[in-house]
Image (spheres, coloured by chain):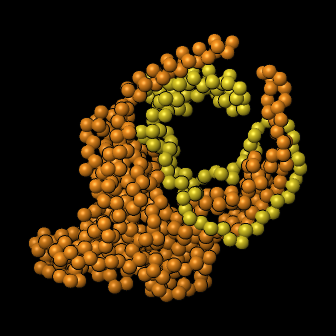
Chain colours: A yellow, B orange
Protein backbone atom coordinates (compact mmCIF):
# COMPACT_ATOMS: atom_id res chain seq x y z
CA UNK A 1 0.00 0.00 0.00
CA UNK A 2 2.89 2.27 0.80
CA UNK A 3 4.28 1.81 -2.69
CA UNK A 4 0.90 2.38 -4.33
CA UNK A 5 0.74 5.65 -2.43
CA UNK A 6 4.14 6.69 -3.68
CA UNK A 7 3.26 5.90 -7.28
CA UNK A 8 -0.16 7.53 -7.23
CA UNK A 9 0.39 11.19 -8.05
CA UNK A 10 -3.25 12.07 -7.41
CA UNK A 11 -2.52 11.71 -3.73
CA UNK A 12 0.82 13.42 -3.85
CA UNK A 13 0.02 17.10 -4.11
CA UNK A 14 -1.89 18.68 -1.22
CA UNK A 15 -4.52 21.23 -2.33
CA UNK A 16 -2.91 23.92 -0.24
CA UNK A 17 0.26 23.50 -2.30
CA UNK A 18 -1.49 23.76 -5.67
CA UNK A 19 -3.18 26.97 -4.56
CA UNK A 20 0.14 28.33 -3.41
CA UNK A 21 1.87 27.19 -6.58
CA UNK A 22 -0.72 28.78 -8.89
CA UNK A 23 0.08 32.13 -7.40
CA UNK A 24 2.65 33.79 -9.59
CA UNK A 25 4.91 34.69 -6.79
CA UNK A 26 8.43 33.85 -7.92
CA UNK A 27 10.48 35.69 -5.34
CA UNK A 28 12.07 32.40 -4.24
CA UNK A 29 9.93 31.77 -1.17
CA UNK A 30 8.18 28.88 -2.94
CA UNK A 31 11.39 26.88 -3.35
CA UNK A 32 11.49 25.42 0.18
CA UNK A 33 7.92 24.17 -0.25
CA UNK A 34 8.78 22.64 -3.60
CA UNK A 35 11.72 20.80 -2.04
CA UNK A 36 9.34 19.23 0.50
CA UNK A 37 7.78 17.35 -2.42
CA UNK A 38 11.08 15.88 -3.63
CA UNK A 39 10.15 12.26 -2.84
CA UNK A 40 6.78 12.13 -4.65
CA UNK A 41 8.18 14.21 -7.51
CA UNK A 42 11.02 11.73 -7.91
CA UNK A 43 8.58 8.78 -7.97
CA UNK A 44 6.41 10.44 -10.63
CA UNK A 45 9.46 11.31 -12.72
CA UNK A 46 10.73 7.70 -12.67
CA UNK A 47 7.24 6.32 -13.37
CA UNK A 48 6.78 8.47 -16.45
CA UNK A 49 10.34 7.90 -17.70
CA UNK A 50 9.99 4.11 -17.53
CA UNK A 51 6.32 3.52 -18.25
CA UNK A 52 5.77 6.46 -20.65
CA UNK A 53 2.04 6.49 -19.95
CA UNK A 54 1.93 10.15 -20.96
CA UNK A 55 3.14 9.45 -24.51
CA UNK A 56 0.79 9.45 -27.49
CA UNK A 57 0.63 10.36 -31.16
CA UNK A 58 0.14 14.13 -31.21
CA UNK A 59 -2.38 14.00 -34.03
CA UNK A 60 -3.29 17.67 -33.62
CA UNK A 61 0.16 18.82 -34.78
CA UNK A 62 1.69 15.73 -36.45
CA UNK A 63 -1.07 15.39 -39.07
CA UNK A 64 -0.54 17.40 -42.24
CA UNK A 65 -3.33 19.94 -42.80
CA UNK A 66 -3.73 23.20 -44.68
CA UNK A 67 -6.17 26.08 -44.23
CA UNK A 68 -7.88 27.76 -47.17
CA UNK A 69 -10.13 30.81 -47.58
CA UNK A 70 -9.59 31.96 -44.02
CA UNK A 71 -12.07 34.61 -42.86
CA UNK A 72 -11.27 36.41 -39.61
CA UNK A 73 -13.54 38.69 -37.62
CA UNK A 74 -12.20 40.47 -34.52
CA UNK A 75 -14.47 42.90 -32.70
CA UNK A 76 -13.36 44.69 -29.55
CA UNK A 77 -15.90 44.30 -26.75
CA UNK A 78 -14.33 46.22 -23.87
CA UNK A 79 -11.14 46.78 -21.88
CA UNK A 80 -10.43 44.84 -18.70
CA UNK A 81 -8.16 45.97 -15.92
CA UNK A 82 -6.52 44.66 -12.75
CA UNK A 83 -6.78 41.00 -13.82
CA UNK A 84 -4.91 38.67 -11.48
CA UNK A 85 -4.20 35.86 -13.98
CA UNK A 86 -1.65 36.10 -16.77
CA UNK A 87 -3.82 33.83 -18.96
CA UNK A 88 -7.42 34.27 -20.09
CA UNK A 89 -9.88 32.40 -17.90
CA UNK A 90 -11.39 29.44 -19.79
CA UNK A 91 -8.98 29.69 -22.74
CA UNK A 92 -9.31 26.45 -24.73
CA UNK A 93 -7.71 27.16 -28.10
CA UNK A 94 -4.92 24.63 -27.43
CA UNK A 95 -7.13 21.88 -26.02
CA UNK A 96 -6.92 18.29 -27.28
CA UNK A 97 -10.16 16.36 -26.85
CA UNK A 98 -9.62 13.21 -28.91
CA UNK A 99 -7.17 11.86 -26.40
CA UNK A 100 -7.96 8.22 -25.70
CA UNK A 101 -5.38 7.38 -23.08
CA UNK A 102 -5.12 8.20 -19.41
CA UNK A 103 -1.75 8.84 -17.80
CA UNK A 104 -2.34 6.88 -14.56
CA UNK B 1 -22.55 1.22 -52.67
CA UNK B 2 -21.41 2.72 -55.97
CA UNK B 3 -18.53 0.67 -57.35
CA UNK B 4 -15.68 2.51 -59.02
CA UNK B 5 -12.66 0.98 -60.62
CA UNK B 6 -9.32 2.43 -59.57
CA UNK B 7 -8.62 5.37 -61.80
CA UNK B 8 -12.24 6.32 -62.42
CA UNK B 9 -13.15 9.91 -61.71
CA UNK B 10 -15.06 10.40 -58.52
CA UNK B 11 -18.80 10.37 -59.02
CA UNK B 12 -20.47 13.38 -57.36
CA UNK B 13 -22.06 12.47 -54.06
CA UNK B 14 -25.76 12.49 -54.68
CA UNK B 15 -26.71 10.22 -51.80
CA UNK B 16 -25.37 9.00 -48.48
CA UNK B 17 -24.06 5.83 -50.11
CA UNK B 18 -20.27 5.74 -50.06
CA UNK B 19 -18.34 5.54 -53.29
CA UNK B 20 -16.08 2.51 -53.36
CA UNK B 21 -12.75 2.55 -55.19
CA UNK B 22 -11.89 -1.03 -56.13
CA UNK B 23 -8.30 -1.56 -55.02
CA UNK B 24 -7.77 -5.26 -55.66
CA UNK B 25 -8.37 -5.41 -59.41
CA UNK B 26 -6.31 -8.23 -60.89
CA UNK B 27 -5.39 -9.64 -57.47
CA UNK B 28 -5.26 -13.43 -57.35
CA UNK B 29 -5.27 -15.88 -54.49
CA UNK B 30 -3.04 -18.94 -54.44
CA UNK B 31 0.44 -19.21 -55.90
CA UNK B 32 2.07 -15.90 -56.82
CA UNK B 33 5.20 -16.75 -58.75
CA UNK B 34 8.43 -14.93 -59.46
CA UNK B 35 8.17 -13.31 -62.90
CA UNK B 36 11.59 -14.68 -63.85
CA UNK B 37 11.97 -18.19 -62.36
CA UNK B 38 8.48 -19.17 -61.16
CA UNK B 39 9.41 -19.65 -57.50
CA UNK B 40 6.91 -18.70 -54.80
CA UNK B 41 9.70 -17.80 -52.34
CA UNK B 42 9.21 -14.06 -52.58
CA UNK B 43 9.77 -11.67 -49.69
CA UNK B 44 10.51 -8.03 -48.94
CA UNK B 45 14.08 -6.84 -49.31
CA UNK B 46 14.05 -4.20 -46.57
CA UNK B 47 17.11 -2.46 -48.01
CA UNK B 48 15.40 -1.65 -51.33
CA UNK B 49 11.72 -1.81 -50.37
CA UNK B 50 11.13 -4.23 -53.26
CA UNK B 51 9.98 -7.82 -53.36
CA UNK B 52 12.84 -10.24 -54.04
CA UNK B 53 12.84 -13.85 -55.17
CA UNK B 54 14.87 -16.02 -52.77
CA UNK B 55 16.01 -18.28 -55.63
CA UNK B 56 17.01 -16.05 -58.55
CA UNK B 57 17.31 -12.73 -56.61
CA UNK B 58 15.04 -11.03 -59.13
CA UNK B 59 13.50 -7.90 -57.61
CA UNK B 60 10.21 -6.35 -58.60
CA UNK B 61 8.88 -2.97 -57.55
CA UNK B 62 5.32 -2.35 -56.43
CA UNK B 63 3.07 0.43 -57.60
CA UNK B 64 2.49 3.36 -55.25
CA UNK B 65 -1.02 2.90 -53.87
CA UNK B 66 -2.17 6.52 -54.26
CA UNK B 67 -1.03 6.59 -57.88
CA UNK B 68 -2.43 3.14 -58.63
CA UNK B 69 -5.84 4.14 -57.29
CA UNK B 70 -5.62 7.65 -58.78
CA UNK B 71 -6.08 9.21 -55.36
CA UNK B 72 -3.59 12.05 -55.69
CA UNK B 73 -6.43 14.49 -56.38
CA UNK B 74 -6.93 17.71 -54.43
CA UNK B 75 -8.51 17.07 -51.05
CA UNK B 76 -10.58 20.20 -51.65
CA UNK B 77 -12.41 18.35 -54.42
CA UNK B 78 -13.47 15.55 -52.10
CA UNK B 79 -17.25 15.26 -51.71
CA UNK B 80 -19.18 12.66 -49.77
CA UNK B 81 -17.68 9.44 -48.48
CA UNK B 82 -15.12 7.63 -50.62
CA UNK B 83 -13.71 4.32 -49.37
CA UNK B 84 -11.24 1.82 -50.75
CA UNK B 85 -12.74 -1.61 -51.26
CA UNK B 86 -10.30 -2.92 -48.62
CA UNK B 87 -11.98 -0.61 -46.10
CA UNK B 88 -15.46 -1.99 -46.68
CA UNK B 89 -17.57 -3.18 -43.77
CA UNK B 90 -16.64 -6.45 -42.14
CA UNK B 91 -19.22 -9.18 -42.43
CA UNK B 92 -19.46 -11.35 -39.34
CA UNK B 93 -20.29 -14.36 -41.49
CA UNK B 94 -16.99 -14.17 -43.40
CA UNK B 95 -14.56 -16.86 -42.36
CA UNK B 96 -11.25 -15.80 -40.84
CA UNK B 97 -9.64 -19.17 -41.46
CA UNK B 98 -9.69 -19.94 -45.18
CA UNK B 99 -8.96 -23.19 -46.97
CA UNK B 100 -7.30 -23.21 -50.41
CA UNK B 101 -6.45 -25.96 -52.80
CA UNK B 102 -2.75 -25.69 -53.66
CA UNK B 103 -2.59 -25.27 -57.41
CA UNK B 104 0.85 -26.90 -57.51
CA UNK B 105 0.01 -30.22 -55.83
CA UNK B 106 -3.71 -30.15 -55.02
CA UNK B 107 -3.37 -30.34 -51.23
CA UNK B 108 -5.74 -28.44 -48.95
CA UNK B 109 -3.93 -25.51 -47.27
CA UNK B 110 -5.33 -23.51 -44.38
CA UNK B 111 -4.62 -19.75 -44.05
CA UNK B 112 -5.42 -18.07 -40.72
CA UNK B 113 -6.03 -14.50 -41.90
CA UNK B 114 -6.12 -13.21 -38.32
CA UNK B 115 -2.31 -13.35 -38.27
CA UNK B 116 -1.15 -13.55 -41.87
CA UNK B 117 -2.42 -13.80 -45.40
CA UNK B 118 0.07 -16.45 -46.40
CA UNK B 119 0.64 -20.12 -45.63
CA UNK B 120 3.06 -22.76 -46.86
CA UNK B 121 1.71 -25.92 -48.47
CA UNK B 122 2.75 -28.74 -46.15
CA UNK B 123 3.22 -31.12 -49.09
CA UNK B 124 5.02 -29.23 -51.84
CA UNK B 125 6.36 -26.31 -49.71
CA UNK B 126 5.02 -23.66 -52.09
CA UNK B 127 3.70 -20.46 -50.53
CA UNK B 128 0.04 -19.60 -51.01
CA UNK B 129 -1.15 -16.01 -50.71
CA UNK B 130 -4.48 -14.28 -50.13
CA UNK B 131 -4.55 -11.10 -52.23
CA UNK B 132 -8.21 -10.75 -53.20
CA UNK B 133 -10.19 -8.75 -50.68
CA UNK B 134 -12.91 -10.37 -48.62
CA UNK B 135 -15.22 -8.75 -46.07
CA UNK B 136 -13.26 -9.89 -43.02
CA UNK B 137 -10.73 -7.05 -42.83
CA UNK B 138 -7.69 -9.23 -43.61
CA UNK B 139 -6.69 -7.68 -46.95
CA UNK B 140 -6.30 -3.87 -46.86
CA UNK B 141 -6.08 -1.40 -49.71
CA UNK B 142 -2.38 -0.74 -49.26
CA UNK B 143 0.71 -1.68 -47.31
CA UNK B 144 3.74 0.31 -46.20
CA UNK B 145 6.75 -2.03 -46.32
CA UNK B 146 9.36 -2.11 -43.56
CA UNK B 147 12.43 0.02 -44.28
CA UNK B 148 14.01 -0.38 -40.82
CA UNK B 149 15.84 -3.70 -40.58
CA UNK B 150 15.57 -6.06 -37.62
CA UNK B 151 19.17 -5.24 -36.66
CA UNK B 152 18.41 -1.52 -36.62
CA UNK B 153 15.25 -2.13 -34.57
CA UNK B 154 17.24 -4.22 -32.07
CA UNK B 155 19.77 -1.42 -31.75
CA UNK B 156 17.01 1.14 -31.10
CA UNK B 157 15.41 -1.11 -28.48
CA UNK B 158 18.75 -1.81 -26.81
CA UNK B 159 19.53 1.90 -26.56
CA UNK B 160 16.06 2.67 -25.21
CA UNK B 161 16.16 -0.02 -22.53
CA UNK B 162 19.78 0.66 -21.51
CA UNK B 163 18.70 4.11 -20.35
CA UNK B 164 16.01 2.54 -18.16
CA UNK B 165 17.60 -0.35 -16.31
CA UNK B 166 18.30 0.89 -12.76
CA UNK B 167 14.65 0.99 -11.66
CA UNK B 168 13.47 -1.76 -14.06
CA UNK B 169 11.78 -4.88 -12.72
CA UNK B 170 14.33 -7.70 -12.15
CA UNK B 171 12.32 -10.14 -14.31
CA UNK B 172 12.39 -7.69 -17.21
CA UNK B 173 16.16 -7.23 -16.90
CA UNK B 174 16.71 -10.97 -16.62
CA UNK B 175 14.60 -11.85 -19.66
CA UNK B 176 15.44 -8.89 -21.89
CA UNK B 177 16.76 -9.92 -25.28
CA UNK B 178 16.20 -7.47 -28.13
CA UNK B 179 16.53 -10.25 -30.71
CA UNK B 180 13.04 -11.41 -29.69
CA UNK B 181 11.58 -8.37 -31.45
CA UNK B 182 8.83 -9.20 -33.96
CA UNK B 183 7.95 -7.39 -37.18
CA UNK B 184 4.20 -6.85 -37.26
CA UNK B 185 1.96 -5.16 -39.81
CA UNK B 186 -0.75 -3.45 -37.79
CA UNK B 187 -4.08 -2.34 -39.29
CA UNK B 188 -4.86 1.36 -39.63
CA UNK B 189 -7.27 3.58 -41.53
CA UNK B 190 -5.76 6.47 -43.44
CA UNK B 191 -8.25 9.29 -43.93
CA UNK B 192 -8.23 12.47 -46.03
CA UNK B 193 -10.76 15.03 -44.85
CA UNK B 194 -12.19 18.06 -46.64
CA UNK B 195 -13.98 20.13 -44.00
CA UNK B 196 -15.37 23.58 -43.34
CA UNK B 197 -14.87 25.05 -39.88
CA UNK B 198 -16.53 27.94 -38.07
CA UNK B 199 -15.11 28.81 -34.64
CA UNK B 200 -16.61 31.55 -32.51
CA UNK B 201 -15.62 32.77 -29.06
CA UNK B 202 -13.70 35.47 -27.24
CA UNK B 203 -10.02 36.33 -26.93
CA UNK B 204 -7.89 38.60 -24.77
CA UNK B 205 -4.92 40.75 -25.69
CA UNK B 206 -2.67 42.05 -22.90
CA UNK B 207 -2.26 45.83 -22.92
CA UNK B 208 -0.33 46.38 -19.69
CA UNK B 209 1.06 44.66 -16.62
CA UNK B 210 2.24 46.20 -13.36
CA UNK B 211 3.19 45.30 -9.83
CA UNK B 212 0.99 46.43 -6.96
CA UNK B 213 1.29 46.22 -3.16
CA UNK B 214 4.39 45.84 -1.09
CA UNK B 215 6.19 43.07 0.73
CA UNK B 216 4.05 39.94 1.06
CA UNK B 217 1.10 41.70 -0.63
CA UNK B 218 3.12 42.41 -3.75
CA UNK B 219 1.52 40.92 -6.89
CA UNK B 220 1.35 41.39 -10.63
CA UNK B 221 -1.90 42.55 -12.25
CA UNK B 222 -2.80 42.73 -15.94
CA UNK B 223 -4.89 44.94 -18.22
CA UNK B 224 -6.33 43.44 -21.40
CA UNK B 225 -8.68 44.11 -24.30
CA UNK B 226 -11.51 41.62 -24.76
CA UNK B 227 -12.54 40.72 -28.32
CA UNK B 228 -15.26 38.70 -29.97
CA UNK B 229 -13.33 36.33 -32.23
CA UNK B 230 -14.57 34.42 -35.26
CA UNK B 231 -12.58 32.21 -37.64
CA UNK B 232 -14.06 30.51 -40.67
CA UNK B 233 -12.00 28.40 -43.05
CA UNK B 234 -11.77 25.31 -45.20
CA UNK B 235 -9.33 22.71 -43.92
CA UNK B 236 -7.74 19.93 -45.93
CA UNK B 237 -6.44 17.14 -43.69
CA UNK B 238 -4.03 14.74 -45.36
CA UNK B 239 -3.48 11.16 -44.19
CA UNK B 240 -5.02 11.30 -40.73
CA UNK B 241 -4.09 7.86 -39.39
CA UNK B 242 -6.02 5.88 -36.80
CA UNK B 243 -5.83 2.31 -35.49
CA UNK B 244 -8.52 0.04 -36.95
CA UNK B 245 -8.16 -2.81 -34.48
CA UNK B 246 -10.49 -2.53 -31.49
CA UNK B 247 -7.78 -3.97 -29.26
CA UNK B 248 -5.25 -1.30 -30.29
CA UNK B 249 -7.85 1.46 -30.00
CA UNK B 250 -8.16 0.71 -26.30
CA UNK B 251 -5.46 2.91 -24.77
CA UNK B 252 -6.29 2.83 -21.08
CA UNK B 253 -2.81 2.80 -19.65
CA UNK B 254 -3.92 0.99 -16.50
CA UNK B 255 -4.95 -2.00 -18.64
CA UNK B 256 -2.49 -2.06 -21.53
CA UNK B 257 0.46 -0.27 -23.15
CA UNK B 258 -1.11 0.36 -26.56
CA UNK B 259 -0.36 4.07 -26.12
CA UNK B 260 3.28 3.11 -26.81
CA UNK B 261 2.38 1.85 -30.29
CA UNK B 262 0.21 4.91 -30.82
CA UNK B 263 3.06 7.24 -29.90
CA UNK B 264 5.44 6.09 -32.66
CA UNK B 265 3.18 7.54 -35.35
CA UNK B 266 3.23 9.22 -37.85
CA UNK B 267 4.15 6.99 -40.80
CA UNK B 268 4.99 8.18 -44.31
CA UNK B 269 1.81 6.61 -45.67
CA UNK B 270 2.15 8.54 -48.92
CA UNK B 271 4.77 5.91 -49.84
CA UNK B 272 2.43 2.94 -49.27
CA UNK B 273 2.12 0.50 -52.15
CA UNK B 274 -0.64 -1.75 -53.50
CA UNK B 275 -1.25 -4.65 -51.19
CA UNK B 276 0.68 -7.83 -51.94
CA UNK B 277 0.75 -10.69 -49.44
CA UNK B 278 4.40 -11.36 -50.24
CA UNK B 279 5.26 -8.29 -48.14
CA UNK B 280 4.08 -10.30 -45.14
CA UNK B 281 6.68 -13.06 -45.59
CA UNK B 282 8.85 -13.19 -42.45
CA UNK B 283 6.39 -10.88 -40.66
CA UNK B 284 3.05 -11.26 -38.94
CA UNK B 285 -0.06 -9.13 -39.20
CA UNK B 286 -3.16 -8.24 -37.23
CA UNK B 287 -6.53 -8.15 -38.89
CA UNK B 288 -8.74 -5.04 -38.99
CA UNK B 289 -11.94 -5.50 -37.02
CA UNK B 290 -13.39 -1.96 -37.01
CA UNK B 291 -15.50 -0.36 -39.73
CA UNK B 292 -15.59 3.18 -41.09
CA UNK B 293 -18.83 3.85 -39.22
CA UNK B 294 -17.30 2.85 -35.88
CA UNK B 295 -14.15 4.91 -36.42
CA UNK B 296 -15.98 7.95 -37.82
CA UNK B 297 -16.63 9.70 -34.47
CA UNK B 298 -12.97 9.36 -33.40
CA UNK B 299 -11.79 10.74 -36.75
CA UNK B 300 -14.21 13.66 -36.47
CA UNK B 301 -12.92 14.43 -32.98
CA UNK B 302 -9.32 14.35 -34.22
CA UNK B 303 -10.27 16.56 -37.18
CA UNK B 304 -11.71 19.09 -34.72
CA UNK B 305 -8.47 19.03 -32.72
CA UNK B 306 -6.45 19.59 -35.90
CA UNK B 307 -8.70 22.49 -36.99
CA UNK B 308 -8.47 24.08 -33.53
CA UNK B 309 -4.67 23.82 -33.56
CA UNK B 310 -4.27 25.07 -37.13
CA UNK B 311 -6.38 28.09 -36.18
CA UNK B 312 -3.74 29.03 -33.59
CA UNK B 313 -1.63 30.50 -36.42
CA UNK B 314 -4.35 33.12 -36.94
CA UNK B 315 -4.56 34.09 -33.26
CA UNK B 316 -1.16 35.74 -32.69
CA UNK B 317 -2.82 38.92 -31.39
CA UNK B 318 -4.46 37.07 -28.50
CA UNK B 319 -1.47 36.55 -26.25
CA UNK B 320 -3.67 35.79 -23.20
CA UNK B 321 -5.60 33.09 -25.05
CA UNK B 322 -8.90 32.42 -26.80
CA UNK B 323 -11.97 30.69 -25.47
CA UNK B 324 -13.95 29.02 -28.28
CA UNK B 325 -17.63 28.84 -27.30
CA UNK B 326 -18.82 27.19 -30.52
CA UNK B 327 -16.92 24.93 -32.89
CA UNK B 328 -18.84 23.82 -35.99
CA UNK B 329 -16.95 21.44 -38.25
CA UNK B 330 -18.79 20.32 -41.37
CA UNK B 331 -17.20 17.36 -43.16
CA UNK B 332 -17.76 17.97 -46.88
CA UNK B 333 -15.78 15.00 -48.12
CA UNK B 334 -13.67 12.17 -46.75
CA UNK B 335 -11.64 9.36 -48.25
CA UNK B 336 -10.76 6.22 -46.30
CA UNK B 337 -8.14 3.62 -47.16
CA UNK B 338 -7.25 0.58 -45.06
CA UNK B 339 -3.52 0.09 -44.58
CA UNK B 340 -1.04 -2.26 -42.98
CA UNK B 341 1.73 -0.21 -41.35
CA UNK B 342 5.05 -1.67 -40.14
CA UNK B 343 5.94 -1.88 -36.43
CA UNK B 344 8.78 -3.71 -34.70
CA UNK B 345 7.42 -4.94 -31.37
CA UNK B 346 9.29 -6.23 -28.34
CA UNK B 347 6.96 -7.45 -25.62
CA UNK B 348 7.29 -8.43 -21.97
CA UNK B 349 4.53 -10.03 -19.95
CA UNK B 350 4.42 -8.76 -16.35
CA UNK B 351 2.54 -10.86 -13.83
CA UNK B 352 1.34 -8.61 -11.03
CA UNK B 353 -0.15 -9.37 -7.65
CA UNK B 354 -3.83 -10.28 -7.33
CA UNK B 355 -3.87 -12.18 -10.61
CA UNK B 356 -3.41 -8.99 -12.63
CA UNK B 357 -1.02 -8.76 -15.55
CA UNK B 358 0.24 -6.20 -18.02
CA UNK B 359 1.83 -6.66 -21.43
CA UNK B 360 4.62 -4.10 -21.87
CA UNK B 361 5.72 -3.07 -25.36
CA UNK B 362 8.83 -1.46 -26.73
CA UNK B 363 7.86 -0.38 -30.25
CA UNK B 364 9.92 0.85 -33.18
CA UNK B 365 8.34 2.57 -36.17
CA UNK B 366 9.25 0.31 -39.12
CA UNK B 367 9.81 3.35 -41.35
CA UNK B 368 11.27 6.14 -39.23
CA UNK B 369 12.91 4.20 -36.40
CA UNK B 370 11.08 6.29 -33.79
CA UNK B 371 11.15 4.26 -30.59
CA UNK B 372 9.03 4.27 -27.45
CA UNK B 373 8.48 1.73 -24.73
CA UNK B 374 7.06 0.76 -21.39
CA UNK B 375 9.50 -0.79 -18.91
CA UNK B 376 8.02 -2.43 -15.78
CA UNK B 377 9.23 -0.94 -12.52
CA UNK B 378 10.95 -2.40 -9.48
CA UNK B 379 8.61 -0.68 -7.02
CA UNK B 380 10.78 -1.31 -3.98
CA UNK B 381 13.75 0.39 -5.58
CA UNK B 382 11.61 3.32 -6.73
CA UNK B 383 10.25 3.72 -3.19
CA UNK B 384 13.78 3.69 -1.78
CA UNK B 385 14.85 6.31 -4.33
CA UNK B 386 11.85 8.45 -3.38
CA UNK B 387 12.74 8.23 0.32
CA UNK B 388 16.33 9.29 -0.40
CA UNK B 389 15.09 12.17 -2.57
CA UNK B 390 12.66 13.21 0.18
CA UNK B 391 15.38 13.26 2.85
CA UNK B 392 17.70 15.34 0.66
CA UNK B 393 14.83 17.66 -0.35
CA UNK B 394 13.69 18.16 3.24
CA UNK B 395 17.22 18.95 4.43
CA UNK B 396 17.68 21.44 1.58
CA UNK B 397 14.30 23.00 2.33
CA UNK B 398 15.13 23.50 6.01
CA UNK B 399 18.51 24.94 5.09
CA UNK B 400 16.90 27.42 2.69
CA UNK B 401 14.26 28.50 5.19
CA UNK B 402 16.92 29.11 7.84
CA UNK B 403 18.96 31.17 5.37
CA UNK B 404 15.95 33.22 4.26
CA UNK B 405 14.78 33.97 7.79
Image coords of residue B168 (percent x, y): 35, 35
Residue at 32 percent across and 63 percent down: it is B285
User: Picture quarter containing residue A19?
Assistant: top right
Image coords of residue B95 (percent x, y): 31, 70
Residue at 59 percent across and 66 percent down: it is A65
The reply to whether residue B79 is in sight is no
Residue at 30 percent across and 59 percent down: it is B149
| Most foreground residue, B181 or A16 | B181
Please say if B82 is above or below B369: below
> In this image, B225 relative to A70: left or right?
right
The reply to whether residue A3 is in sight is yes
Please say if B132 is above or below B164: below
Image coords of residue B361 (percent x, y): 36, 48
> In this image, B93 relative to B125: left or right?
right
Count of number-bearing discs: 0
> In this image, B191 relative to B272: left or right?
right
User: Picture quarter containing residue B175?
Assistant: top left
If the image is split into quadrants, where does the N terminus of chain A sit? top left
User: Picture quarter containing residue B228?
Assistant: bottom right
Residue at 56 percent across and 73 percent down: it is B334
| Most foreground residue, A94 or B138 | A94
Residue lying furthest left in this view?
B123
Residue lying furthest right in this view?
A78
Amino acid sequence: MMLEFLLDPASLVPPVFTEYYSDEDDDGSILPLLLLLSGPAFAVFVYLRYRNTDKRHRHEVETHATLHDVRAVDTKVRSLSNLSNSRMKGANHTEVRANRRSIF
Amino acid sequence: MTQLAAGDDAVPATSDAPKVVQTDLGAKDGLTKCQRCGSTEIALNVATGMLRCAFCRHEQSSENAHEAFDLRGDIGDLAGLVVGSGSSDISESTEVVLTFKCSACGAEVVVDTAHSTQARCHWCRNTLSVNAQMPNGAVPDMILPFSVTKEEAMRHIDEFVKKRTFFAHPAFKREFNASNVMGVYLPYMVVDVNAHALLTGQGEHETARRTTGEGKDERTVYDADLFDVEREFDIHIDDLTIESSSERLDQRTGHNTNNIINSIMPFDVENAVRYDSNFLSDFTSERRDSNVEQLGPAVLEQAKDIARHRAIDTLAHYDRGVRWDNEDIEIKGQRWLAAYLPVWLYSHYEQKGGGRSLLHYVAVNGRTGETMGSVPLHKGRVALGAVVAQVIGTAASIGLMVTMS
